[in-house]
Image: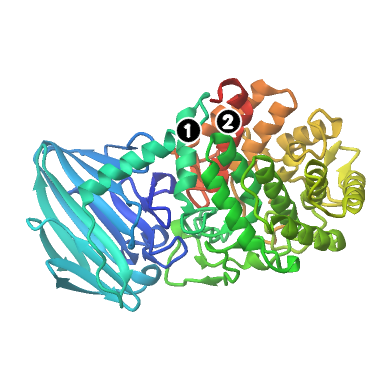
Amino acid sequence: MHPRIEDYALIGDEQTAALVGMDGSVDWLCLPRFDSAACFARLLGDEENGHWRIAPKGAEGPCTRRAYRPDSLVLDTEWETEEGAVRVTDLMPQRDRAPDLVRVVEGLRGRVTVHSELRLRFDYGSVVPWMRRSDGHRVAVAGPDAVWLRSEPAVRTWGQDFATHSEFTVGPGESVAFVLTWHPSHHPRPPLVDPREALRVSVEDWQAWAARCRYDGPHRDAVVRSLITLKALTYRPTGGIVAAPTTSLPEEPGGVRNWDYRYCWLRDSTLTLNALLAAGYQEEAKDWRDWLLRAVAGDPADLQIMYGLAGERRLPEFELPWLAGHAGSVPVRIGNEAVNQLQLDVYGEVMDSLSLARGAGLSDKPHAWAVQCALMEWLAGNWREPDEGLWEVRGGRRQFVHSKVMVWVAADRAVRTLEEFPDLSGDLEGWRALRDEVHREVCEKGFDRERNTFTQSYGSLELDASLLLIPRAGFLPADDPRVIGTIEAIAAELGHRGLVRRYSTDGRTVDGLPGDEGTFLACSFWLADALHMAGRTKEARELFERLVGLANDVGLLPEEYDPATGRHLGNFPQAFSHIGLVNTALVLFGDERAG
């Protein structure tokens, strides 16, 4: 049986990440970056597409228990067998030059025979490398990729069926370490890491980082785990944060809603900055702000909704026909065609993020305000255009209400910045007039008076969960009757067993796609925020408790959740969901007990 999405745990080195199943198998790993081709792709295919399993010999099912070391990204997986007990510890130490995957096997009780099966398949499971011995190690090479496997000299290792097998026995106090190291095949082998020292240092470094968290309210463990996950999804060299480390995990099992999320979205920027700043992570917030400024530099008309890890603009979308897809969900997509869409809301996100950063005292960049002025100049002439909206619909452009609200946010933040920082210059009166005009139009054309709710787009009967952000954005106060009506309408029409869908996929879908999807966790956190702001704090906290409980056994959240089956859906773990958890905890409890 193929592992479920919720069966996976995350390890990483802040440049890439691996997913480890409950059966002890590493089923997804892209090297050397998040967006590189995978050398383990069982996640989207089968064992022949690459994986690395270490488990007691003969063990077929999941482990007995697993957990992260407290406040770290170091994973312990344990098995109880008739012969005894054994632990596998998985980590990716922060790299010096090359990425390393370290796996340490320890005997806990009795004497347990352990089997390792390493099946490397470069280029998303399609290329079988040439494996040879060198310097007492094994090295696999194919095209641009080279991977070294290092284990203890006493471990018996052999090749079989285009895989590398190892077998050994451990007792109490005994341990065996494996290190898998990637490098470009035309380079010499990088320096070897000490696996046990790497383990010690990794735990210490993660725990020291987690200790900086200022939040000390309820569910602190979940908040810290979310922040660690965000840190793990950060591409350290540039400060960019990927939406998820995976591609094509389905929003509907067996369906076509499978997308590549290994890129950095501008829509996440304000909420990410808010979470990092409020939790006490100024350095990470500054790195994200700096990435944002570099990515959006250039002609404002060319502003994209997402970029690569270093700000790359070309993310062409194509399909991998040799992969069967997770749970038979095809196509498997690489790249993301939505990069070419017009989404007016990202102008508001960028303006809001840079305003938040400036207000929080992050050291200002000399060109930041010039970039913002250029964005505003373009927006003033183009804000009336229809767009694809923040959900990247593929069913044609519309006058999305959330997009127009974010145009208002852009103008509002520009006005506030000039009012707060009189040394800056800009079109204050023009931006005030723009702000007022957009507000009038949204309230006139984007509001259904009969149902007392804002709608997904001008003249539409459909609703959209993004409208829950209206009070948070400051467009209207949370106690405005129109906001109250919108909250109630969304809870009623988009609610599903207490959680929230993004929009309706029932017959009149705007996204141009067949099939359905699950409830969207970030939107469910937004409902909790809106309920609290509207004075319904008890309901908000009950919803938050439920959402925290949807994390898997090691505290990770997906993009979507199916309340009917209890299954995780979509790419995993999802930054947007963990950002939602942190921000909602801060909204609900931060004022009470923040440090």
Q: Residue at x 42, y 33 (%)?
A: 211
Q: Earlier in the sequence, mark 2 or mark 1?
A: 1
**Separation of residues labelled 2 and 1 (CA atoms):** 9 Å
Q: Amino acid at mark 2?
A: Ala
Q: Is residue 425 or residue 559 the one in the foreground?
A: 425
> Which quarter of the picture shows residue 51?
bottom left
* Residue 122, horizontal then vertical, whole percent: 35, 70
Residue 171 is left or right of residue 593, and the answer is left
Could you tell me if residue 579 is visible in this image? Answer: yes
* Residue 479, horizontal then vertical, whole percent: 81, 28
> Does residue 87 lie above or below 322 as drawn?
above
Q: Residue at x 23, y 66 (%)?
A: 148
**Which residue does the numbered mark 2 point to in the structure image?**
585
Which residue ends up furthest to the front in the rendered image? Answer: 423
Could you tell me if residue 561 is visible in this image? Answer: no
**Which residue does the numbered mark 1 point to in the structure image?**
222
Labelled pair 2, 1 in contact (Cβ < 8 Å): yes
Residue 491 is left or right of residue 192, and the answer is right
Disc 2, SS = helix
Disc 1, SS = helix
Using a 10 Å C-alpha cutoff, classify the residue at mark 2 as few (fewer than 14 neighbours), some (14 to 19) or many (20 or more): many
